[in-house]
Image (cartoon, coloured by chain):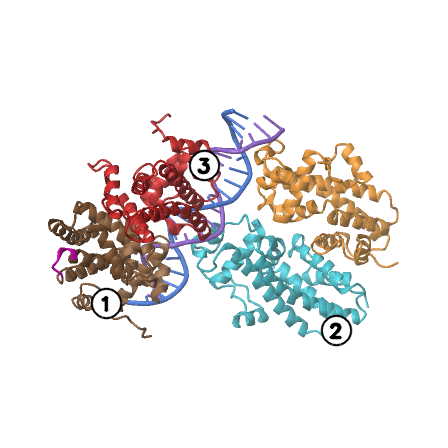
Chain colours: A brown, B red, C orange, D cyan, E blue, F purple
DNA sequence: CATGAATGAGCATTCATTCAT
DNA sequence: GATGAATGAATGCTCATTCAT
């Protein structure tokens, strides 16, 4: 049943090739994608392992050959997304030099991850945090720190260049909220492109030159 | 068992007296407060009716004398909060005339509701939306529309006065995210007051004069 | 609230006056009537004490001032009906001398009790027997024996007179079933009167002269 | 644990082979048999799913792998019985030609089903009707109509042959009551055989030749 | 690897009964 | 007598997880 599969970005494809993340069309990849979608739509607690099984065409008992328990699936959804997006952000930063351009690149990356293919997983990352057991939270927090450090160091750089006024830590937090909330209202089909939205978000943070 | 009870604001007390919302020290009021706290901390699904009963000192079966089912408790938590905060915002708007001051008043109100006593309920409103059945969602949406209209009309006024540049609808959404996200990081005990935070948030929206 | 109250038969009224059964318009009488109706319609188990209270306009807790528990209400419904119908049958027998006429009188009495005002209670007597605790069953069985003895002795008399062929005990049982089942199909409004039905039932038992 | 299993009749076995009804020694068949017995003895409402589980040696939760809810078990009990007895009646009719013999065959069939192995289920069919939700009742009524049509058409035939006097519809109803009531008094161990009882019941309906 | 029946702890909800007012 | 909030045991049902096949 060869569905039309959207082409992966070159950066994403490279990460698949290196084994950093699962290929979206592999068995595990499809499970994680389905899980992200269901967890976003119904919530982790209300999604049963039978739902998950049905979504990928196997019996619920067979899921446990791939992951030891339901929570591990949630954790894998989150891990893969952070890792993928961290790498995509690194690649984007390396292609820009101007501090304001770098901030815009990060905003664009984050919006694309929230509003694009990994959007469901990004939402799960925010909304299902409490469903992780503490041990898993700590593990994910490590990955999140790496991700956030890219942001903070970029904003510090922008502040030093005079383009940012607010305290970088607080600015990042206000931006995090503003961007992650877009999942609740932004619709791709409207007449506001992600690029336009990114530029509008940039004006929250950066003084016009 | 007379606990130390924080004094209600005059506006809040008036609403209690009018029967618009339950008194926080009434049986129903204490249940809703406990429910908001538990729903925030553990999530609606993971909070059992036994948890709720224990939190207010009654058996789980007795809860059903006050609310017909668990979902009705969630719904009441949400309804009360929106109604209360809508009224508090109305009162705050009526005390300010300058468009920028009005926007600041709304930001302050929203931050106080998110970071203060009704913070748990506000968080529940965002995070447990999916746990409401559709019928309840529609009911709450009506209340939310009234609340959001206060925001939108105030931002339109500010734009007309030249202090706001961005489209009001988009600005409101970016602000909604930025403000609601504060619950995840702002700590009262730190050295950033809510008033300071409100002013910083204002700079996202409003051009310096 | 003086509802139009159907006139009691003279025999029934006499029993009320003697205190043998509750007056149908007394507090207890109305409760038993409502209970019979609800127990018939929904079954004893599915009828809650709240249903009973609502039907007579009091709170459920107040029922327990009249009867010590729910089962006692069921038992009272049954007792009253058997006692009443036993007395009505005695009166009817005393007004007939011919053996066949006597059998017809009993059939008529039983049909009237099943299809008339006490029909709900008669149905309950059959369908809710298992809901009585054993002690109550034994008590009711005593009353039932008196009732059945009227039947058996009348049928024996009819057999001795040659009008009945079958063993009286078996005949009574077959008739019991045939008559009690009428509650499931006979409708007063149709074009078959109870009297006609009684005569048809008689032909099951009695040879034409 | 090979219990002594009564041999199925050839007709019954054929229906099992065709998949029309569950084999009495299959998992589902044993559950339905146990359910029928418990529902008859204690009533549907008073029978808990834990009772059902215990009766077939599984946990109550496991019942829900076979039937989606308790009511579906009740419904299956009823459906299987009607279907089985309809087929057995068809077979019996096809082996008799004389109208009176055909009526006797139906009476015999019905008595055997009431007093034999499916007796519990037949009782449940009568006594627990109200416990079915309306949708299920309609479904069962369709099956019941087929069953009753066999009776009515046979009685019409008998009336046309002059052996029956009463209106067939009314006669069927009186007979239904008389026969179904036998469950409350007939005991196999007594000195009245089912065949003798069937012949006595026939005399209610049919004039001696 | 996959199945699917079974587990068993846990859940929301019901309801007869009690009792302070 | 009547109220109605509270009790607490019991109920039908769910579901992640196990495991023999």
Q: Which residue is mark 3?
A: B20
Relative image position of residue B168 (x, y in whole percent): 32, 51
- Screen quadrant of the C terminus of chain C: bottom right
Report helix, strand or loop for mark 1: loop
Distance between the alpha carbons at the discs numbered 1 and 3: 55 Å
Residue D18 versus residue A3: which sits nearer the camera? Answer: A3
Name the residue rendered at 78%, 32% in the picture. C17
Q: Indicate the quadrant containing the N terminus of chain C: top left, top right, bottom left or bottom right.
A: top right
Location of residue B27 (image quadrant): top left
Of residues B146 and D140, the one nearer the viewer is: B146
Coordinates of residue D179 in the picture (x, y in percent): 69, 58
Q: Which mark is residue A23?
A: 1
User: Where residue C103 appears, x then y in whole percent?
Assistant: 82, 50
Q: Nearer the viewer, residue A121 or B63?
A: A121
Identify the subunit bearing mark 2. D
Q: What element does badge 2 sit on?
A: loop
* Subunit that carries the residue with mark 3: B
Which segment did they paint magenta?
A96-100
């Amino acid at each position: 049943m060869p569905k039309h599969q959207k082409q992966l970005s070159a950066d994403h494809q490279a990460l698949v090739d290196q084994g950093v993340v699962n290929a979206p069309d592999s068995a595990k990849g499809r499970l994680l994608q389905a899980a992200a979608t269901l967890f976003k739509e119904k919530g982790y607690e209300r999604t049963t392992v039978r739902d998950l099984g049905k979504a990928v065409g196997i019996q619920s008992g067979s899921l446990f050959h791939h992951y030891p328990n339901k929570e591990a699936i949630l954790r894998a959804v989150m891990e893969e997304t952070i890792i993928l997006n961290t790498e995509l952000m690194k690649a984007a930063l390396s292609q820009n030099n101007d501090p304001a351009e770098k901030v815009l690149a990060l905003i664009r990356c984050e919006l694309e991850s929230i509003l694009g293919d990994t959007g469901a997983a990004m939402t799960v990352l925010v909304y299902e945090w409490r469903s992780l057991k503490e041990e898993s939270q700590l593990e994910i927090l490590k990955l999140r720190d790496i991700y956030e450090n890219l942001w903070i160091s970029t904003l510090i750089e922008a502040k030093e260049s005079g383009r940012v006024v607010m305290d970088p830590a607080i600015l990042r937090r206000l931006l995090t909220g503003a961007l992650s909330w877009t999942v609740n209202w932004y619709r791709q089909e409207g007449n506001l492109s992600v690029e336009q939205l990114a530029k509008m978000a940039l004006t929250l943070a950066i003084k016009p030159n």
